[in-house]
């Protein structure tokens, strides 16, 4: 899709404004006028923050998909398992209701997959309904009687991950790891300062990590091995097709202030649901990165990024350091990549031995 940002005009902007308005966001006194002004940017920022996306005020693939899916209301369409799967706020509402009732619909990601169908079938069986996996008016009416549809999770309501998120009984030697070096090709990521562009740093660390993992017996799947452009939604698709056990996306942070520094990690989270396994793994990697690089371990955060939502396995994104820090001129990229890969590997090993 065309990336939309401040100053753009046209029918695509009209579409974005219309969708924002229908969701209750204020696009300013001029309303739906086809101009991407400050009011529209503010509405986009608010939507992104509410949705757990990167809040940059720009409508790219991830924000556009979430905006479209947010418009689906429960009961507006018949839901069932299909390829490609149904996606949207109506699916998310269904998953939340099923999980609150104790029917495990899997991650609350708004994607109608096999786990969601299985939960629907179990609900139909226990309710005396026809077991066809179809979410129609009869299913929604009965579900509304026994649960408060859309009620946010409390910590007690969430179905816990198996083994509390830890990889009990597994080892790196028999694990498939998908590594995603962020950006690439015509998307350089951050490219200011004296260090290499972010895409090159990401790849350098990823390749060293892949080599180390393979030496331990892991099977490694890379979303890219060179300076190539890989579309955002193709990255998790590669991991899913490989049957990976872990998805690890590597990026580097940046900030307008040279004082910003620290290692940070992200795991999937959406409207109260979160991946316990992702949270545990991200924390272990961040702690190791902070110790190895001599920076602060920033709090790991739950986010609804596409690479975390679309993956069907435990997924994390890590940013080892801010490449805009005051001492970046003294950093050797080769040494940095080696330290980062060793720290990430140590975090992975800790996860599989805890």
Image: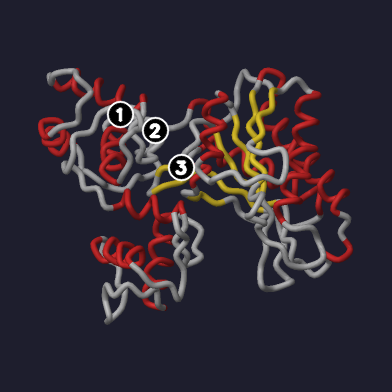
Q: Residue at x 81, y 61 (%)?
A: 195
Task: Say whether disc 1 or disc 2 marks the residue closer to the N-terminus.
Answer: 1
Q: What residue does disc 3 label?
A: 274
Q: Residue at x 15, y 36 (%)?
A: 140
Q: Does residue 258 appear to the left or right of 28 in the view shown?
A: right
Q: Residue at x 17, y 34 (%)?
A: 143
Q: Nearer the viewer, residue 64 or 272?
A: 64
Q: Is residue 354 visible?
A: no
Q: What residue does disc 2 label?
A: 159
Q: Position of residue 105 (x, y in %)?
A: 34, 30
Looking at the rendered structure, the secondary structure element under dot 3 is strand
Q: What residue does disc 1 label?
A: 102
Pointer 1 and pointer 2: residues touching (CB < 8 Å)? yes
| Residue, far bottom | 29
Task: Say whether disc 1 or disc 3 marks the residue closer to the N-terminus.
Answer: 1
Q: Does residue 193 appear to the left or right of 3 in the view shown?
A: right
Looking at the rendered structure, the secondary structure element under dot 2 is loop
Q: Is residue 161 visible?
A: yes
């Amino acid at each position: 899709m065309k990336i939309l940002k401040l100053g753009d005009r046209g029918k695509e902007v009209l579409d974005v404004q219309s969708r924002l308005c229908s969701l209750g966001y204020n696009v300013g006194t001029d309303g739906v006028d086809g101009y991407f002004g400050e009011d529209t940017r503010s509405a986009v920022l608010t939507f992104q923050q509410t949705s757990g996306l990167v809040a940059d005020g720009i409508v790219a693939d991830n924000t556009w998909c979430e905006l479209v899916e947010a418009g689906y209301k429960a009961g507006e369409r018949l839901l069932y398992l299909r390829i490609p799967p149904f996606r949207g706020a109506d699916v998310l509402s269904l998953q939340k209701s099923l999980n609150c009732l104790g029917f495990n619909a899997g991650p609350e990601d708004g994607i109608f997959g096999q786990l969601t169908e299985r939960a629907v079938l179990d609900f139909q069986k226990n309710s005396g309904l026809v077991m066809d996996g179809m979410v129609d008016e009869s299913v929604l009416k009965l579900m509304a009687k026994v649960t408060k549809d859309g009620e946010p999770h409390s910590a007690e309501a969430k179905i816990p991950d198996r083994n509390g998120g830890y990889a009990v009984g597994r080892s790196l030697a028999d694990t498939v790891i998908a590594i995603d070096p962020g950006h690439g090709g015509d998307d350089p990521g951050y490219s200011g300062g004296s260090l290499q562009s972010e895409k090159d740093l990401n790849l350098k660390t990823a390749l060293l990590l892949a080599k180390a993992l393979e030496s331990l017996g892991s099977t490694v799947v890379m979303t890219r091995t060179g300076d190539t452009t890989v579309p955002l939604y193709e990255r998790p698709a590669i991991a899913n097709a490989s049957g990976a056990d872990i998805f690890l996306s590597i990026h580097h942070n940046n900030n307008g202030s040279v004082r910003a520094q620290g290692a940070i990690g992200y795991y999937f989270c959406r409207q109260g649901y979160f991946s316990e396994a992702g949270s545990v793994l991200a924390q272990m990697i961040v702690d190791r990165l902070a110790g190895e690089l001599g920076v602060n371990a920033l709090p790991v955060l739950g986010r609804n990024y596409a690479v975390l939502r679309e993956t069907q396995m435990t997924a994390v994104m890590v940013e080892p350091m801010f490449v805009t820090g005051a001492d970046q001129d003294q950093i050797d990229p080769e040494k940095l990549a080696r330290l980062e890969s060793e720290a990430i590997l140590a975090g992975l090993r800790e996860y599989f031995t805890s």
